[in-house]
Image (cartoon, grey):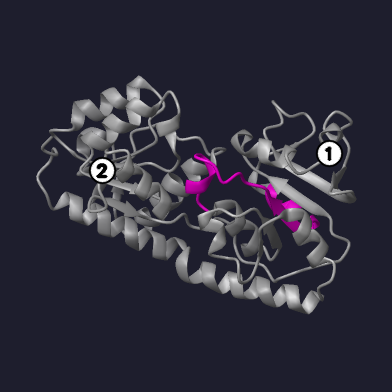
Amino acid sequence: MKISYPQEVNQQRASDRYRLLLPEKELRKRGHEIVAPIEADVLIFSKCMDEGTLNLARKYMRRKRIVFDMCDNHFGTNHAYKHSEMIDLADAVTCPTEQMRDLIAEDGQGDHGNVTVIPDPHEFEFDEPFYSPKLELLWYGNNTNIQALFNIVTPYFILEQSTTINIAGESYRFCAVGDQEKNFWMRSYSKNTMLQELMNCDAVIIPQDNDWWGRVKSPNRLLEAVARGRFVLANSIPSYDVFKDWMWIGDIAEGLAWLKQQSGEEICNRIKKAQDHIKLNHSIETVTDQWEDVLTSVVGTAPGKVI
């Protein structure tokens, strides 16, 4: 199969890695060709943040099969009309969670029949579970997630460039990885930095608002921490709730108090079980199988969806 990813890809952007780069690499290994749009059997678009992307999809809609992957809820942003039209133009639509699929249907831009849930793969290799009661904490994420962090920590630590945060009256050693250009107190994201800080920490905190933006999010931040053998404390959103039997999903301050009472053996056993779940459901092989199913079904139809 000849596949094209027409958009410019940014390796620093998590959605591009999970939804484009990692599946593309595995598809190449399976013998599929990655080619220019004019040569392709199918074009895969992910997000639509500019008119150029929309115009490109309009150009090819009657000549090529189009798959549109919608990984975030942009119906609530000024990019809503672009995403709605992309869904109309596409022969198939994919997304990472059932909640995102339901939202596309609720918005009237698709139905459950032509929207396929393909979960994010994990990116990092698995490491042995580890826990230390020192409780040095790590947070990482995009600026769209940072307000949820501010909601649980004493905010003045940012101005002091401190390596200590306060949560519910308790102090913890702390590191944050994200966009250093906008947040000078963070370590700038890179894969090596992430691997280093995951190795240095004892647990990962992932505050996440369960609002219109957060409730449809994939668990990719949780996946990476668990894959590297770290316990996660996260607020409840549907994709995190899947891990509630193993990780702490709920109020993070309560979770930290609970964690201090647990044995290292108990926490490592929980991490191992969560890793087993990830291996079964989020391996790049499993995820690419699902991408192949969608692409094969689309290529077997005539180009251009009837609107």
User: What amino acid type should be assigned to the residue bearing mark 2?
Assistant: Gly
Segment tinted magenta in the rendering: 194-218
Tell me which residue sits at (13%, 37%) in the image.
304
Q: Residue at position x 69%, y 71% from top?
A: 128
Q: Is mark 2 on a helix, strand or loop?
A: loop
Q: Residue 202 carries which label?
A: none
Question: Where the C terminus falls, by quadrant?
Answer: top left
Give the image location of residue 164, x and y in percent.
88, 44
Residue 232, position as x, y percentages in the image: 69, 60
The local crowd at label 1, few if under 14, some if 14 to 19, many if 20 or more residues have their Cα within 10 Å, is some
Q: What residue type is labelled 1?
A: Thr
Q: In this view, does 114 lie to the left or right of 307?
A: right
Q: How far apart are marks 2 and 1 (CA)?
A: 42 Å
* Magenta stretch holds residue 201: yes
Residue 154 image label = 1
56 above or below 127?
Answer: above
Residue 252 left/right relative to 235 = right
Report which quarter residue 27 is drawn in: bottom left
Considering depth in this image, is 205 or 56 the residue closer to the camera?
Answer: 205
The reply to whether callout 2 and callout 1 are in contact (CB within 8 Å) is no
Q: Residues within 10 Å of mark 2 (few under 14, many from 20)?
A: some
Q: Name the residue under label 2.
A: 110
Q: Nearer the viewer, residue 111 or 115?
A: 111
Q: How many circles with numbers are drawn on the protein?
A: 2
Residue 84 shown in magenta: no
The answer to which image quadrant residue 285 occupies is bottom left
